[in-house]
């Protein structure tokens, strides 16, 4: 069988990029692979070696891309990373409120249509089959309705659909996708799995899925490579992996840490509002595109809400109104903590009582600060840390980092953490000020099975305390904590 990628006893030149032991790895032309393992275990490090980002000592990675005629790795391997799902590694100008700020749009702002036209032309393939693939992708992801939409206005799910479509239109020999199903609604996930299954049956295409959620491996995958403790385990068949996969524990948070959360003192300056969120006849519109229409919604103190809806239905836009990140929020009839929006409170008065994490926030964090300083920024409601915390505040940060399993990572800088570890840091940042209102938009993105259970444990424990209100968004029903007692579903407007 043809060996498309092969590494024998690979050791990277730079010590900082080395795995715990030499890497041995093979991808053959009769295989479709999943690379799985815990957060921080080394999955992304292995992929960086496969695509040539981390050169090896003595012997190079061996490639055989035939029948492709291009020898370039960049032409034959397309890699969609976790960060790409939020806008790209080079998107340094992005900031948290940008998506809702129409003033950012000018004649150079790309649209979905312009980006996909570029991808189609770059592929160099204009066959009937390739046009058919484009049409199928557009239909599956509802791209036709997004072609005139500016990139910076896309929801995180819509942005992920764009990146997936771009990659598939580029006609690669090997397609590597980091957690391709997270952020997609259930219908889109199922359609993508069927499409990938069809493509590997019809084209010279090898797929490598890098998965944190290892209990949802598609059935077109033939082999699994586990990476843990910075070691690449021997390749096994999907059936062998599933037969020996460890079950997800019923609880991960220790009893002592759960009790410590329950024993946290009540904050003296908390609101004791009856209506935490109250919206009346809210409408959000960008040009001719209506996002929210005539919305009435009330969240009472102590309620725990699940917010759902298809990609692009307006979930994150709705939450941006609550957090005052959307400029249109002050034109809407919104009451927070029994106070009418625009009655004299500042954005910082509002944020003091809200803990928040979202895909947009993850995308906005490009600062390579020590992890504990990222957590501490939650005390100051800032993206960077501009006011030095005192020692008691740092003790609080260490407590929440310990709760989320981040002991020993306090001084590691944010961009040197794995994407899953970054998400845990941002979760610790959301909890660190013991907020009255917890807004969690896709909080389990990129987390392995154990950490997903850990975060659910933390949420459930936190919400047992009085004066705690929760609004949570997820596209996976099983991700919702047991404390959910109210639901609202948004419908995407045509």
Image (tube, helix red, strand yellow):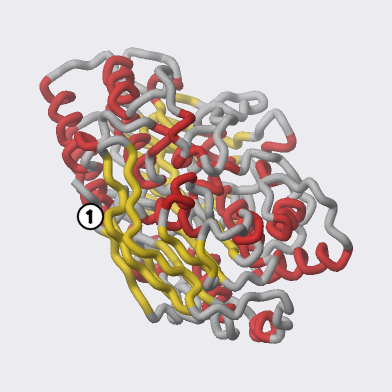
Identify the secondary structure beneath mark 1.
helix
Task: Name the image quarter holding the N terminus.
Answer: top left
Residue most extreme to the left: 128
Residue located at (29% from left, 65% from top): 489
Q: Is residue 216 above or below residue 6?
A: below
Q: Nearer the viewer, residue 180 or 89?
A: 89
Q: Position of residue 192 (x, y in %)?
A: 25, 46
Q: Is residue 220 above or below residue 151?
A: below
Determine the residue positioned at 65% across, 47% down.
Answer: 417
Residue 453 on image: x %, y %: 51, 71
Give the tally of numbered discs: 1
Asked if residue 69 is positioned above or below residue 234 in the image, the reply reads above
Q: Is residue 350 above or below residue 147?
A: below
Q: Residues within 10 Å of mark 1 (few under 14, many from 20)?
A: few
Residue 183 in sight here = yes
* Residue located at (36% from left, 64% from top): 280
In the figure, is residue 320 to the left or right of 485? right
- Outermost residue to the front: 343
> Looking at this rendering, what residue extends furthest in the right direction?
391
Considering depth in this image, is 287 or 153 the residue closer to the camera? 287
Q: Is residue 446 left or right of residue 177?
A: right
Nearer the observer, 79 or 2? 79
Percent of width and height locating residue 232? 55, 48
Residue at 66% across / 71% down in the picture? 434
Residue behind mark 1: 187
Q: Quadrant of residue 141?
A: top left
Residue 244 visible to an observer of this rendering: no
Picture coordinates of residue 80 (x, y %)? 43, 36
Answer with left or right where residue 252 lies relative to residue 407.
left
């Amino acid at each position: 069988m043809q060996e498309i990628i092969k590494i024998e006893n690979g050791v990277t030149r730079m010590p900082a990029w080395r795995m715990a032991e030499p890497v041995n790895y093979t991808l053959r032309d009769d295989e479709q692979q999943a690379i799985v393992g815990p957060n921080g275990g080394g999955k992304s490090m292995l992929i960086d070696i496969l695509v040539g980002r981390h050169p090896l000592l003595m012997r190079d990675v061996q490639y055989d891309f035939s029948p492709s005629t291009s020898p370039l790795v960049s032409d034959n391997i397309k890699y969609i990373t976790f960060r790409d799902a939020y806008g790209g590694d080079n998107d340094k100008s992005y900031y948290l409120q940008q998506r809702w700020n129409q003033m950012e749009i000018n004649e150079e702002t790309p649209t979905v249509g312009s980006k996909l036209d570029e991808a189609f032309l770059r592929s160099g393939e204009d066959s009937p089959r390739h046009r058919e693939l484009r049409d199928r992708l557009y239909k599956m992801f509802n791209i036709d309705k997004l072609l005139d939409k500016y990139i910076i206005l896309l929801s995180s799910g819509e942005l992920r659909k764009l990146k997936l479509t771009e990659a598939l239109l580029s006609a690669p020999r090997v397609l590597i996708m980091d957690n391709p199903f997270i952020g997609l609604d259930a219908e889109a996930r199922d359609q993508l799995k069927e499409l990938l299954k069809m493509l590997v049956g019809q084209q010279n295409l090898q797929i490598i899925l890098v998965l944190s959620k290892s209990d949802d491996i598609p059935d077109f995958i033939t082999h699994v490579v586990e990476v843990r403790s910075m070691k690449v385990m021997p390749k096994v068949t999907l059936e062998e992996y599933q037969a020996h996969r460890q079950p997800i524990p019923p609880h991960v948070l220790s009893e002592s840490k759960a009790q410590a959360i329950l024993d946290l003192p009540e904050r003296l300056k908390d609101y004791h509002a009856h209506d935490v969120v109250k919206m009346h006849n809210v409408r959000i519109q960008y040009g001719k595109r209506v996002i929210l229409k005539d919305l009435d919604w009330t969240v009472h103190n102590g309620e725990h809400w699940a917010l759902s809806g298809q990609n692009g239905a307006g979930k994150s836009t709705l939450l941006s109104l609550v957090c005052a990140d959307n400029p249109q929020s002050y034109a809407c009839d919104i009451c927070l903590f029994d106070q009418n929006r625009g009655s004299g409170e500042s954005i910082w008065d509002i944020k003091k009582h809200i803990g928040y994490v979202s895909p947009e926030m993850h995308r906005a964090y490009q600062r390579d600060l020590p992890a504990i300083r990222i957590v501490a920024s939650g005390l100051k409601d800032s993206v960077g840390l501009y006011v030095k915390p005192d020692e008691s505040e740092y003790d609080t940060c260490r407590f929440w980092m310990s709760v989320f399993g981040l002991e020993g990572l306090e001084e590691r800088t944010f961009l040197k953490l794995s994407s899953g570890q970054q998400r845990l840091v941002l979760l610790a940042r959301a909890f660190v000020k013991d907020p009255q209102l917890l807004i969690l938009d896709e909080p389990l993105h990129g987390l392995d099975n154990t950490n997903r259970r850990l975060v659910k444990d933390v949420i459930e424990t936190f919400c047992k305390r009085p004066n705690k209100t929760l609004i949570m968004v997820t596209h996976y029903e099983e991700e919702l904590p047991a404390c959910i007692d109210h639901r609202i579903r948004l419908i995407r407007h045509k």
